[in-house]
Image: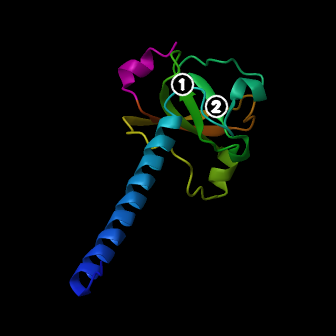
Amino acid sequence: MKIHGQAKLRILVLGILTAGIMVVTGALGNAVAAKEMYKMAPPPDPYKKVGSLVPLPDFIPGLGSLYVDPSTLPAGPFLAYDRKGRLVSSVYMIPLKEINDHKEFRNLKVAQEKVDHVDMYFNAGHPGVPEPHYHVILWYISPEIQAGLK
């Protein structure tokens, strides 16, 4: 059976469209899968539980259980989970010295969740980030639910 002219062109266009749809749906599927990987604790490598890296409790009241990719320190993000292992926020810890030096922080990783609200406050230092710094917290939960992180 020979295919001529218009039929060949239709088959070619249909093949290109099919391949394009497969690429787009595959990319969307990968993006959804990547987003889902962080929704529940523990997040995948290279994230580590902060308490396994420095002397901090496994659950910090008001924040949750923190995980971080050590290569992103000190800024993070630190991924915070509630006691049921659900992602509640991303925390960035920005040293005051770097703010005063006008250092830029670009392309910080995000968890790709819908942000409910943002908090920013000073911290004098703690294990893991001992110098004075600011916490910038992208909350994915309401302030009412946040208040219950005890």
Task: Report the number of discs.
Answer: 2
Compared with residue 10, is residue 113 higher up or lower down, i.e. above or below? above
Return the mark for residue 54: none
SS category of the residue bearing label 2: strand
18 up-or-down from 57: above or below = below
Q: Position of residue 12 (x, y in %)?
A: 33, 76
* Residue 42 located left or right of residue 125: left
Badge 1 density bin: few <14, some 14–19, many ≥20, Cα 10 Å: many
Q: Residue furthest bottom?
A: 5
Tag 2: residue type? Tyr
Given residues 67 and 63, the one toward you in this image is 67
Pointer 1: what residue? Answer: 81
Are there few (<14), some (14-19), or many (20+) residues within 10 Å of tag 2? Answer: many
Amino acid under disc 1: Tyr
- Picture coordinates of residue 11, whole percent (x, y): 29, 74
Residue 9, can we see it?
yes
Q: Quadrant of residue 102?
A: bottom right
State the image coordinates of residue 86 (x, y, percent, origin top left). 49, 24
Residue 46 falls left or right of residue 6: right
Looking at the rendered structure, which numbered label has been put on residue 67? 2
Q: Where's the N terminus, which quadrant?
A: bottom left
Q: Nearer the viewer, residue 132 or 25?
A: 25
Q: Magenta includes 146?
A: yes
Residue positioned 50% across, 16% down in the render: 84
Q: Is 63 one of the magenta-colored residues? A: no
Image colouring: rainbow
Say whether marks 2 and 1 touch (CB < 8 Å): yes
Highlighted range, magenta: 141-150
Residue at (64% x, 31% y) in the render: 67
Residue at point 42%, 39% (across, down): 113
* SS type, badge 1: strand
Chain-order first, disc 2 or disc 1: 2
